[in-house]
Amino acid sequence: MEIKEVNLKIVYLILIIFLINFNLFSILEVNDYYDINLIEKSGIFRYETFQRYNSSTTIGLLSTDYFHEFAGRMVLTIMPPELYGFMIKSEAIFSRSTKREYGGEFEKTNGLILYYGEAYLGFRNKYFTAKLGFQNLVSSDAIYNHLLLDDYSGPFFALKLSFIITRFVDVDLIYNFIRPHQGEWSSNLTTIYEKSSLYGKSLFIRKVNIRPLPWIRLGFSDSVYFLGENMNIWFLNPFSVYFVTLALEKFFVEKYGSALNTGSSDLKVGFDFNIGFKGWRVYGELMVDDSEAFFLMFRYPIFPNRVGFVIGGELRGYLFSNYIKLPKYFNFIFGNMYINMEYGVVSKYTYSRDDNNNYEYVRQEYQNKYYTTAPVSQEELNRIQRVGNFIGFMYGSNSDCFDIAIGWRNDLVDVRGYAAEYQGDIYFDSFKNKKIVDRLFKFQIHYRHYRLGDERNILTPFYMNEHYYFDLDQDLDSDGDGNKTNDHSNRETEFLRIILEEGNQLDFHIYSDIIRISRFIIGIESKFNFIWTTFHPYTWKEETNFTFRWEIGLSIIW
Amino acid sequence: MKEVKIKQVKIKFFIFIIIFFIFLNSCALKYNYAIVKIYNNSSVSLRYKGLLIDEQSGSNPGEMIIKVISPNKERIYANESDSIDITWASFQENVFLNITWGTSNVYATSTGFFTLKDGDIIKLSLDSTSDFHFPNN
């Protein structure tokens, strides 16, 4: 009896330690180029099928740049048959890596850090889905990159409601709390920073999908990204149009300084589509980012208009093998092959609040920027600037990315042709016949080329970002209308005029089931990653680094 | 006859590839690049900024945008240094850069606009107490 009591105490102690050390919204350690969540970017290779919900994986990683990692993840999806439609999803990850900082109690575990990924409660049926909790949400059906909201930046605490209105229309409402508001609300963000409390950040998305035919989806989204208190009644209202709400602000001057001031609410509108069925599809996303809706209202641009788009497509072998008579063996090989290709580009100043680089659309700002005693080191700068801190496009503003992948998996028929899980897709997918495979084998060769342009420094504190006009000449009247306070920028957006970094990545990814006992499957997974990064390309200072990374993992799936 | 035809096709193919690579080479991007190293010679810490005239942004000098180049460090402490690098399109031979600095006001003192060429590595010593002179001149 005594031994049991001691054990319980240890369990409670461990629980308390973990609870104290979990910084729920911290992402700096996680949201790094060396993030093991990057595996999620493996496109169709990674797309899970309807069959397998739970898995536990142990991953080892070695790299030529003296980076190594030992990690594990456990994904549980509990769907009690007594409560049909309800589900609990949880994802826990532990990792020990040479690139991740640790402290506090994690020193006792020798740097083995535990954190979690997705964790939500959900209800899903044919017509309605609700999810509450930390979720990896994406804003379009693209395979690699999404512009408004990307899963690479990690799970956010959100309420997502999707429902189908008719076969032709379905609606998505996403109330996404990027960070909870701390302390009082002040329009002066610097004051809040100095008090070392953080202002809240939220992204609310409303999306209407129109389906003229079951295999054609056209999505229109209206979203607002705002700072301050998360529960903003103006934006919570599901029937208000954000675009109109922000325009109304002009009539409610007294609202300035409240949660709704234009300096802190950023409107983004988007259009996306996904067209295709039975083995082919094309998809795309377009996003217009505009802080004050002036561009959309066809008024003078205080801020440069900023856009981004993603376009891509996918072909699967069974599209051809269904119509061409092939030998059975060849049919099996060719029918399960796939190829996909995607290009995404985001123009300069996108995701920034001002015309220069005052970035707010990031998961976490670089908080030490106000510490004069400890300026940022070059290594830290490279890490934060690079990838994954943006809520939207992984590479941030003024960058592009091209992906191509070719692969094979024997359950390809079951792999869904959509990513964002709109209710219409779930509805039409429920009618399809599913194929149950005894054994899963998949491999993929993936190539990526990305480019990063200039003026995308997310570290720059905003006191350094004043526009030249505002800085030097308070009396300047740039448009000659007699009003000295409405000076506007003549800056325009641009697509990668000057490139500061280029990268090529080639990876081979392979997975195979080994043993199957009852419903448990033991599988092995491996990835060979070749990365070439060129700094200051096409100049005399050009310099290319090569890194090789090898990952191997053992999974138990049930 | 058939063999000759195949040979001709091969030669044409190779010529095509060579021309294609020459074309690719001629299309290759090129950028100019310069480094400006800044030393703080004064006894106090300084804030600084770079102002770069973007000549592509307008036809008249009044319309041109001045890009504000913000350093990564908020301040350079006494006897410390920092550097900024500038990349620009190769069809512009020169760009014009101005470094402004001060103890509290970034625009208290400035070098005035000076010319930067491809490959330049310029060293500037900032001192808030005296007028600025280029070390080269």
Image (tube, coloured by chain):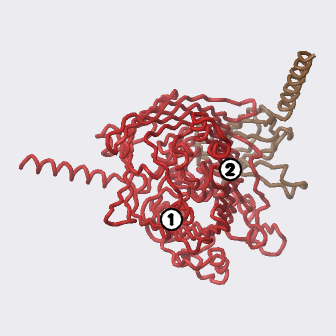
Q: Is residue A478 above or below residue A499?
A: below
Image marks 1 and 2: residues in contact by CB distance under 8 Å: no
Q: Position of residue A524 (x, y in %)?
A: 42, 34
> Which mark lies nearer to you, 1 or 2?
2
Q: Give me the chain that's brown.
A: B
Q: Position of residue A332 (x, y in %)?
A: 57, 38
Relative to the observer, which residue lies in front, A2 or A266?
A2
Can you say which quadrant of the picture contains the N terminus of chain B?
top right
Relative to the observer, which residue lies in front, B28 or A318?
A318
Q: Which residue matches tag 2?
A: A312
Q: Marks 1/2: CA distance?
A: 27 Å
Local SS, label 2: strand
Residue at mark 2: chain: A
Q: Position of residue A254 (x, y in %)?
A: 59, 82
Relative to the observer, which residue lies in front, A44 or B117?
A44
Q: Quadrant of residue A296?
A: bottom right
Residue at figure coordinates x 80%, y 49% from the top left: B53
Q: Quadrant of residue A205?
A: bottom right
Q: Position of residue A450 (x, y in %)?
A: 66, 41
Mark 1 or 2 closer to N-term? 1
Q: Which residue matches tag 1?
A: A176
Question: Left of B96 or right of it: where is A210?
Answer: left
**Amino acid type of disc 2?**
Gly
Residue at mark 1: chain: A
**Amino acid type of disc 1?**
Asn
Query: Around disc 1, counting alpha carbons within 10 Å, would you say few (fewer than 14), some (14 to 19), or many (20 or more)?
Result: many
**Camera sees residue A188:** no
Question: Left of A460 or right of it: where is B24?
Answer: right
Question: Left of B43 or right of it: where is A300?
Answer: right
